[in-house]
Image (tube, grey):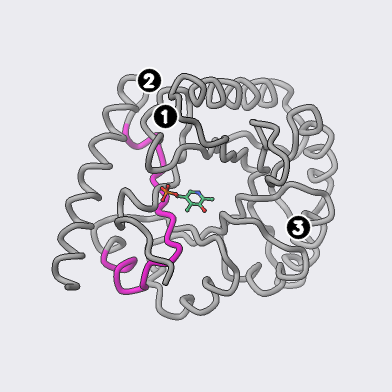
Amino acid sequence: MTEKLFRDVEYNYQRINEQIAEAAEKSGRRREDITFLAATKTVAPEVINHAISLGLDHIGENRVQELLSKYDAYDLSRCSLQFIGHLQTNKVRQIVDKVDLIQSVDSFKLAKEISARSLAHGKVCDILVEVNIGREENKSGVFEENLEELLCQIAQLEGISVKGLMTIPPVCENKHKNLKYFYNMHKLFIDISEKKLDNVSMTILSMGMSSDFYEAILEGANMVRIGSALFGARNYT
Ligand SMILES: *Cc1c(COP(=O)(O)O)cnc(C)c1O
């Protein structure tokens, strides 16, 4: 069973890399300009480590409890560990010393806690601000019109370094609609970059998952978060 799974992951890993390279080239960039982060929820550490042995160098978890339970088993010697899910303020202290970047910051309250806990560990935490580009109710992320103000507030915090933006667009049956969200997000990313806000670096634009990473790269993503296309469909039981 494991042998078969390992071979599937090898095959998928190679294919995804080829697709990333092709989309990068089509959008006037190189393969190295795009970061492939594997979303590892529900995936066993031995499978994650197999992907790391193939060259994968960024993984992301989206649940605090799951990250903690797998933490000692990851081989992180050549791989960065990021947090990509919704993060509750009262759980920040459990992960802040373990992750290299938190992708999903969408409030000043959360940022303040990350900053304080990071400073207590003598570190500055890299973060992305999550944008709710589809303006969906009950979804994390800041609305576009509040982004600049939030960035300016967060930029004052000593324990945080803003590295860019992340989004999870609405699920669309229609690919054209999806492209529009990616396009709008890239435009926002460029607009904010051009404002050259103090202590705000717009380096990473994290968008695109298994079903749409190719389109996301064409529209300007430079980090994609891919789970099921690499590891197979998730089994939550
Ligand atoms: C699970 C997850 C992904 C990857 O989803 P797939 O469709 O399996 O590629 C990306 N981003 C976040 C925040 C996730 O939780």
Ligand 1 within 8 Å, label 3 CB: no
Rounded to the nearest angstrom, the CA distance separating label 3 from label 2 is: 35 Å
Q: Percent position (x, y) of residue 116?
A: 80, 64
Write down the quadrant of residue 196 in the picture: top right
Q: Residue drawn at (38%, 20%), measured in percent from left and top? A: 27
Residue 34 lies within the magenta run: yes
Q: Amino acid at mark 3?
A: Gly
Nearest the eye: 56 or 198 = 56
Q: Percent position (x, y) of residue 129?
A: 68, 43
Q: Is residue 83 left or right of residue 135?
A: left
Q: Residues within 10 Å of mark 1 (few under 14, many from 20)?
A: many
Q: Percent position (x, y) of residue 167?
A: 59, 39
Instruction: From the image, tell me which residue sits under label 1.
Output: 217
Residue 4 vertical position relative to residue 105 in the rendered view, above or below:
below
Q: Amino acid at mark 2?
A: Ser
Instruction: From the image, tell me which residue sits under label 3.
Output: 159
**Local secondary structure at mark 1:** helix
Foreground mark, 3 or 1?
1
Q: Residue drawn at (79%, 27%), measured in percent from left and top? A: 145
Question: Which numbered disc flags the more N-terminal residue, 3 or 1?
Answer: 3
Position of the C terminus, as image quadrant, is: bottom left
Q: Amino acid at mark 1?
A: Ile
Residue 196 got which mark? none
Residue 27 got which mark? 2
Rounded to the nearest angstrom, the CA distance separating label 2 from label 1 is: 7 Å
Q: Which residues are magenta?
A: 31-50
Q: Percent position (x, y) of residue 114?
A: 74, 61
Residue 76 lies within the magenta run: no
Rounded to the nearest angstrom, the CA distance separating label 3 from label 1 is: 31 Å
Marks 2/1 in contact by CB < 8 Å: the verdict is yes
Q: Residue drawn at (77%, 54%), measured in percent from left and top? A: 111
Foreground mark, 3 or 2?
2
